[in-house]
Image (cartoon, coloured by chain):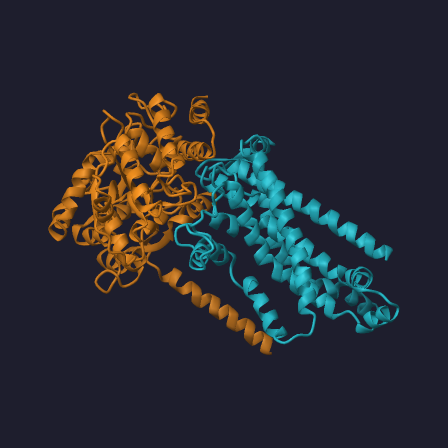
Chain colours: A orange, B cyan
Amino acid sequence: MKKKLFALFLIAALMLCMIPAAFAADDEITLDVIICQYGPNTNEWFLGKGMDGSNFVEKFEAANPGIKLNLDVVSWNDVYTEVDTRIANNNAPDILNIDVFANYANEGLLLPVKDYCPDDLFADFFPSFIDQSIIDDTCWAVPDLASARALFYNVDILNEVGVEVPTTWAELQDVSQAIIDFYDGEIYPWGIDMTTDEGQAAFAYYTWGNGGGFVDANGDWAVNSPENVEAIEYAISLVNDGYTNPNPATQTRYDLQDMFAAGKLAMVIAPNQLPTYVADKGGEINMATAGLPANEGKASSSVGVMDRVMAFKDDSAPDQAARNEAIGKFLKFFYDPENYVGWVSMEGFLPAVNSAVEALVAADPSFEAWLDVLGGCQFYPTAKAEWDQVKQGVIAAEQNALTGADVQAELDKLQAELTK
Amino acid sequence: MNTGLNRTKWEPYVWLLPSILLIAIFVVFPILIVFKLSFSEISKAGVIGGFIGFDNYVEAVHLPAFKTVMLNTLWWVLSVVILSTLLGFIIAMVLNQKFHGQKIARAIMVFPWATSLVIQASVWNYIIKAEYGNLNNVLLNLGIIRQAINWRSSYQIEFVWECWVGIFVTVPFVTFCVLSGLQSIDGSLYEAATMDGAGFWHKLRHITLPMVRPSLTVSTVLNIIYVFNSFPIVYTMTKGAPAHKTDTMITYLYMLSFYERKKGPATALSVIGFLILCVCAGIYMMTVMRKEEEL
């Protein structure tokens, strides 16, 4: 008898579970959204109480009846694993926030932006940002935010040593030697990150500062150009001469930022959020920014990093037009200056839309200078299908060079793989 | 009567069914999926395509880092399993003696085992940090060194540190396996041996080792599997850098899959690893069981 009662209870429980699905409105759309975790506030803003005591999901659903958000905030460490696993299981998210997009676009998984993004919103994005997400004349993603890299230096250290911030590679070597001599090696003059996290940034800093880069003037891969070889050899020589942190292959940008915040590192190339990061760590560093040092006679170039929002196709959706419209509403709500300004300034990033600039500059005048820096930035060629391979390839070349391998041979090998 | 006999025949299988189902769903099925994937084309984004034979295996073994990674894995497993077994055995012998604070000593031994591997590896990362690591701080404060030492000055040394952390976290498991074996030995055996004039080494060789062999077998086989499959230590300490020179097979296939987006070769490597483990564990078990039968 007890068993029968238990079975009945189970059946009743199952039926109760099905009630919400049965009563759900036929025209209700649920969007699966994956957002990357940019910092400690991301989760609070999207899902907690970080948006004026409420959160993005609650506010969006209140403003858009009939659209539900199933939103996950995923750490950068896990997001690739999660997205790839979901794609392999035919369960791609509807909306994804991530840095890369070319693989998804080339494999036909993404919706063109014009299918869901309202025209007025599309026109609001910085054109130079949109250009980075175009493959074969089609835009596949929109930028959600950006950051620009600059040289941060500890003013007190440089003043104490009696040197000026370096603008050329030769000056950088002289200043580094002076810091080493003055502090007897107690302070690292220069920070360098050649880890699997950001080794591609190191490649960009030095090769762009020597007139080289990932691609040539035609946009074809040119990783083994003489300028690139010279640049990476120079970067490796900084390490070998003892001017840098001792383990560039395992010390990430965050390790360098920690050292800088602790006054252990005199100069580091870092994103515009560094002052916020140092303050959060309790550091009180008298810091200033400057352009990245370049080789003699070559132009200095900063590095811009941009993340994106993209929408995946879902052939199983019963009403494609309604789904596209819902995605568009999500974007409109996200980029609404009332919401977007809070989002961008919360983590100290730079905006991707014109409509946010005025409000951001009004709130923090230092944004204006960074927006100028951003205007002159170069971006990684992420729209090219081989970018993943190139990114890991240049990191491997740098790391092998750190252990004594020949830079020319390493880059030649990578170039041969790319052009075979 | 017949019904009773029939019932005794099938009843054990009914009771086993839930376990068999769980194993099938959570162990056998994923293994079969990985085998299938290793023979399939997998795109950079993770889309699974058609059957491509052994192409993924061929690509995997021709990867530039393959040889280095396999050698690293061999050194990693051998050094961690052998040295932790040796150290664990010695510590278990000590903990089996009666002394003041014996219980506290045993409790302390559990700590490294009870802490997650990521935390262990992170703590060791801090200990050996050149800039403000605890090891340098202690040595500087004691006046033993005058300048901070870079304890990770080459990738070979970094790999040694990874092995050391592997040993450090594995020793407690071996210690408690051996300790349980030691505690089950009848004390009269040692008394009889002492009366016959046997010394420490004789007793160790002819009583202790044969009696704890089953415990050692279990700990060694499990350690081979755990250490081979261990991901957190290497990933937390070096992420295989520089250029996979400190990677083991498990971390390498992760990097291959999710950093380099070569998912096909990564699944092939995971199958190769699975087969290697099956062979190693099988050979070891057969050898030990044969010896036990001879005894």
Expressed as whole percent of the image width and height from the top left, the position of residue A143 reads 26, 41
Expressed as whole percent of the image width and height from the top left, the position of residue A54 reads 25, 63
Q: Judge left or right: residue A259 versus residue B52.
A: left
Residue lying furthest bottom? A1
Residue B271, located in which quarter of the rendered image?
A: top right
Q: Nearer the viewer, residue A253 or B256?
A: A253
Relative vertical location of residue A395 with respect to residue B81 in this rendering, above or below: above
Residue under the point 60% across and 39% down? B70
Expressed as whole percent of the image width and height from the top left, the position of residue B151 reads 48, 48
Relative vertical location of residue A185 with respect to residue A395 in this rendering, above or below: below
Residue under the point 39% across and 54% down? B132
Q: Is residue B36 visible?
A: no
Q: Is residue B87 visible?
A: yes
Residue A171, located in which quarter of the rendered image?
A: top left
Residue under the point 57% across and 42% down? B249
Q: Judge left or right: residue B104 versus residue A140.
A: right
Residue lying furthest right? B196
Q: Nearer the viewer, residue B238 or B223?
A: B238
Q: Nearer the viewer, residue A368 or B19?
A: A368
Q: Judge left or right: residue A74 versus residue B169.
A: left
Residue A55, located in which quarter of the rendered image?
A: bottom left
